[in-house]
Image: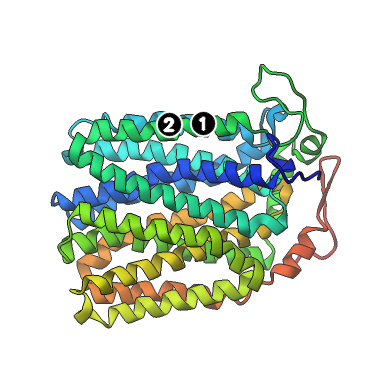
Amino acid sequence: MNIKPNFSRSLTESPLSRYFSFSALYIAQGIPEGILFFALPAWLAMNGKDATEIAAFIGIILIPWSFKLLIAPLMDRFTILSMGRKRPWVIFGQLGLILSFLSIGFVPDPLNNNLGLMVVGFMISFFGAFQDVATDGMAVDVIPDDEKARANGLMWGTKIIGTSLSLLAGTALINSLGFTLAISLLSIAVAIIMIVPIYFTERPGEKTMPWTQGQVNSESEESQLRSWSDILKSLFRVTKLRSSLIFIVISFISGILFGLVDTLFPIFTIQELGWSDTYFSQLFSIINVTAGFLGMFIGGYLVDHFGKMKMLTIYLGLITIIMAAFAFTTGFWTNTIFICGFIFTYYVLYIFLSIAVFASGMHLCWKTVAATQFTLYMAVSNMGRATGSGLLGTLQANFSWDYVFLIIATTPLIMGILIQFINFKKHREVVDKFVILKHTFVAPHVIED
């Protein structure tokens, strides 16, 4: 691979182009998510909606992220190869994200129309998931192994910053200009990012658009699978390895953790602690922007320097400790500084953990079915998120808040135990021996890690 240090329109030729492009695409995901998962729940909580109704809304809009598993094989099987293996799908997903996000601003009487919000929110999540699958598949395909942790740090950092800024701006705009105009203004930012997947190509010589000059890159043509049978056989071969199976379980439990906490914070701070939605969004945005910058510049470096296994174990152990400690310190819950410190600590660890998990998932992938395999991990994680979000209403209805936090603390503990059974080096050695020869699967004799 010919790597150029300077900016290039070809993603395989320039690290700077890769970092910029994938960061921009993740910002495009973060803006709608900031509104859907944080601003709207906070706004609903501020206007007296109960935890069950809010949790139901979040649970519904999380469901499409589980559809990623159905989308990914389609992307591995079909494409406009002259434009790249995944880039045509990135463009399609980004276009759908723009249109669906704009449409939520026109839901009539959104405060009392939970069904309408769910339907449009479902569509935003669908296209967000679509764009995410294509972006992740393209990332696994064009980002070298020694850049994956660093790239994931930038991608997740910028996504968190996009989520936080959209939450801050969205809350302020909804309260001052109204729901429709606020969403319309934020949709412009998502639309501008459409320039990125149109301008950049995966590899040199490819077409920018179907009607422009260009040709199929030989590397893309060699790695493209041309039958469903090859995809299924290849996916089964790599996912049946022990490390991959354990990572699937870990992905689901991590989703439960993230879904529980993300749904919990706006409800807990507004309805239990008496915060306003504006105060919550401002504080949450400041914390997340700060945590996002730390993730961008430190998170990826730590994983590269100390290794995935060590950092995953540390992050999971620390999250377990702070969650359990918070459950036993109810006397400090009236102290705003204490609450802010807890939320800040959690979100720094959350971002760092996400970076490590994503880098680990990409490392376990086989390039031939990268989109499908990585999406399998993420789809399972998002199933966990939907489960966790829906579970919060039940937990809150049956347990006091301190017990809810204590229950949440068990999820990273279980993950920390399971992660010890993954052998990244041995898994990689086995996967590197897999080959596709004339579109027929050929594998080494050693099939277990």
- The answer to which of 390 and 103 lies nearer the viewer is 103
Give the x, y percent position of residue 53.
22, 51
Q: Please, which residue is most extreme toward the front here?
A: 6
Circle 2 crowding by C-alpha within 10 Å: few under 14, some 14–19, many from 20: many
- The answer to which of 31 and 416 lies nearer the viewer is 31
**Residue 118 occupies which quadrant of the picture?**
top left
Residue 408's label in the rendered image is none
**Residue 117 occupies which quadrant of the picture?**
top left
Say whether residue 260 is visible: yes
Q: Amino acid at mark 2?
A: Ile
Q: Tag 2's secondary structure?
A: helix
Query: Residue at the spot x=33%, y=67% of the render?
Result: 343
Q: Earlier in the sequence, mark 1 or mark 2?
A: 2
Query: Residue at the spot x=61%, y=29% of the render?
Result: 199
Q: Amino acid at mark 1?
A: Met
Query: Label 1, on which residue?
Result: 194
Classify the position of the N terminus by image quarter: top right
Give the vertical position of 138 relative to 255 (above or below).
above
Say whether residue 364 is visible: no
Marks 1,2: beta carbons within 8 A: yes
Colour mapping? rainbow
In space, the residues marked 1 and 2 are separated at their CA atoms by 9 Å
Query: Label 2, on which residue?
Result: 98
Instruction: From the viewer's perspective, tell me whether residue 166 is left or right of residue 111.
Output: right
Give the x, y percent position of residue 73.
62, 41
Give the x, y percent position of residue 171.
25, 45
Give the vertical position of 113 relative to 352 (above or below).
above
Q: Tag 1's secondary structure?
A: loop
Classify the position of the C terminus by image quarter: bottom right
Give the x, y percent position of residue 135.
58, 42
